Image: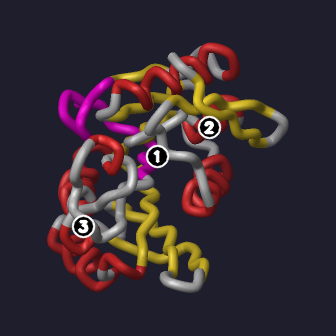
C-alpha cells in the first residue's frame, strides 16, 4: 500500500492510502460512543483506514469485523490493524452483503453529502441524491444483524432529513434516538442509535 499520509489518535499512528477517507469530527463522535459501549462483538461498515475497529478491539472487544467496498481502504485498514490490533477481521463487501452474523454493536459513518457519485474518488463522502444513498439501505437492513440487545450507531447529517430516517426506522421495526448533536457552520451532525427494543 502506498502511504499518502498518516494521522495520530491516542498516541497511535494510522496510515491512509490514496483516496481513503480521513477521520474527522464525525468519526470522532462515533468512536467515542462505540468504545464507551464495551460490546462483545462489533461490526464496522465502511471502515476507511480502520480507526474504529482498531480502537474497539484495543478497548477489549474480542470479536471485531470491519468491512469496506474499497480495496484501497481495506488495504489501509489491514495495514493499520496488523500493527495495532491483529485480532480484527476484514471483509471486502458492499454494506451487509455476505454478512450473516449478528453483533452487539454495528457502526457506520456513511458517505452523506448530498452530491452524486462520479468517480471512485468521491465514494468515501458522496451520498447521492439527498445524501441518503446508503443511509436508507443501512436502516432497512441493520435490524437483521443486531443481537438481542444489540444497537447500531450511525452518523447522520442535517442535510439528510432526520425525519425520513425516523420514519424508515419505524417501518423497519427499530427505535431511533439522537445521542449527540454537533453544530457546524453549514450543517449539524447527529449521532443516532438504532435498536430493535425501541
Q: Percent x, y for residue 108?
A: 41, 51
Residue located 32% across and 76% down the image: 160
Crowding at label 1, few (<14), some or many (≥20) Cα neighbours within 10 Å?
Answer: many
The CA distance from mark 1 to mark 3 is 22 Å
Which label lies toward us, 1 or 3? 3
Q: Which residue is mark 1?
A: 105
Q: Nearer the viewer, residue 83 or 170?
A: 83
- Tell me whether the residue at label 1 lies in contact with that at label 2, contact meaning CB atoms closer than 8 angstroms: yes
- Tell me whether the residue at label 2 lies in contact with that at label 3, contact meaning CB atoms closer than 8 angstroms: no
Which label lies toward us, 2 or 3? 3
**Is disc 2 placed on a helix, strand or loop?**
helix
The CA distance from mark 2 to mark 3 is 27 Å
- State whether residue 124 appears in this view: yes
Crowding at label 2, few (<14), some or many (≥20) Cα neighbours within 10 Å?
Answer: many
Determine if the magenta segment contains residue 104: yes
Residue located 58% across and 75% down the image: 180
Q: Which residue is mark 2?
A: 56
Left or right: 138 as drawn, with respect to 105: left
Magenta-tinted stretch = 92-108
Q: Which residue is mark 3?
A: 132
Amino acid at each position: 500500500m502506498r502511504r499518502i499520509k498518516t494521522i495520530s489518535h491516542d498516541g497511535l499512528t494510522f496510515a491512509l492510502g490514496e483516496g481513503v477517507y480521513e477521520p474527522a469530527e464525525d468519526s470522532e463522535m462515533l468512536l467515542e460512543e462505540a468504545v464507551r459501549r464495551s460490546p462483545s462483538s462489533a461490526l464496522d461498515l465502511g471502515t476507511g483506514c480502520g480507526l474504529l475497529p482498531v480502537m474497539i478491539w484495543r478497548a477489549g472487544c474480542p470479536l471485531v469485523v470491519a468491512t469496506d467496498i474499497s480495496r484501497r481502504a481495506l488495504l489501509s485498514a489491514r495495514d493499520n490493524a496488523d500493527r495495532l490490533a491483529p485480532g480484527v477481521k476484514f471483509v471486502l463487501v458492499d454494506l451487509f452483503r455476505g454478512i450473516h452474523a449478528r453483533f452487539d454493536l454495528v457502526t457506520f459513518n456513511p458517505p452523506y453529502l448530498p452530491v452524486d457519485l462520479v468517480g471512485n474518488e468521491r465514494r468515501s463522502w458522496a451520498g447521492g441524491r439527498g445524501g441518503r444513498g446508503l443511509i436508507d439501505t443501512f436502516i432497512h437492513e441493520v435490524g437483521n444483524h443486531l443481537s438481542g440487545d444489540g444497537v447500531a450507531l450511525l452518523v447522520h447529517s442535517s442535510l439528510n432529513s432526520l425525519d425520513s430516517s425516523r420514519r424508515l426506522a419505524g417501518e423497519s421495526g427499530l427505535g431511533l434516538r439522537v445521542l449527540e448533536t454537533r453544530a457546524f457552520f453549514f450543517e449539524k451532525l447527529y449521532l443516532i442509535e438504532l435498536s430493535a427494543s425501541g
